Amino acid sequence: MDDIYRICDIKPHAINLLVSRFIDTDNTMKEKTPLIDHIGSFIGIVVIGFILFILAWPIIDPTPNKSSTLKENAQQLTK
């Protein structure tokens, strides 16, 4: 820590404040993430899930005749 004081010319109190933001009571590193990071992660998961759903849709397609048009399949389902 003394090297940091000399190289950066930062007062010990300021370094202790900076370090205390990232170290919890168990002396393990813990980064605090803002809410916008959690929102971005959620949006990313939703987008990836949607893309995987689109890619898997031909496999799980429930229509009776996959080669016919959507209108024909809808008519067959309502009969």
Image: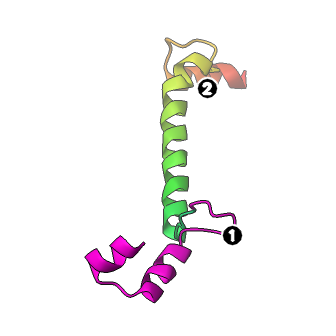
Identified at 48% across, 49% down, the residue is 44
The residue drawn where x is 38% and y is 88% is 11
From the viewer's perspective, is residue 44 above or below residue 17?
A: above
Crowd rating for badge 2 (residues with CA inside 10 Å; few <14, some 14–19, many 20+): few
What's the amino acid at mark 1? Thr
Q: Nearer the viewer, residue 45 or 69?
A: 45
Local SS, label 1: loop
Q: Are marks 1 and 2 in contact (CB under 8 Å)?
A: no
**Spot occupied by residue 21 in the image (x, y as percentages of width and height):** 54, 75
Marker disc for residue 25 = 1
Structural distance between the alpha carbons of marks 1 and 2: 62 Å
Q: Which residue type does callout 2 highlight?
A: Ala
Snapshot colouring = rainbow
Q: Quadrant of residue 7?
A: bottom left
Residue under circle 2?
A: 74
- In the image shown, does 70 or 56 lie closer to the viewer? 56
The reply, left or right, for residue 55 in relation to residue 60 is left
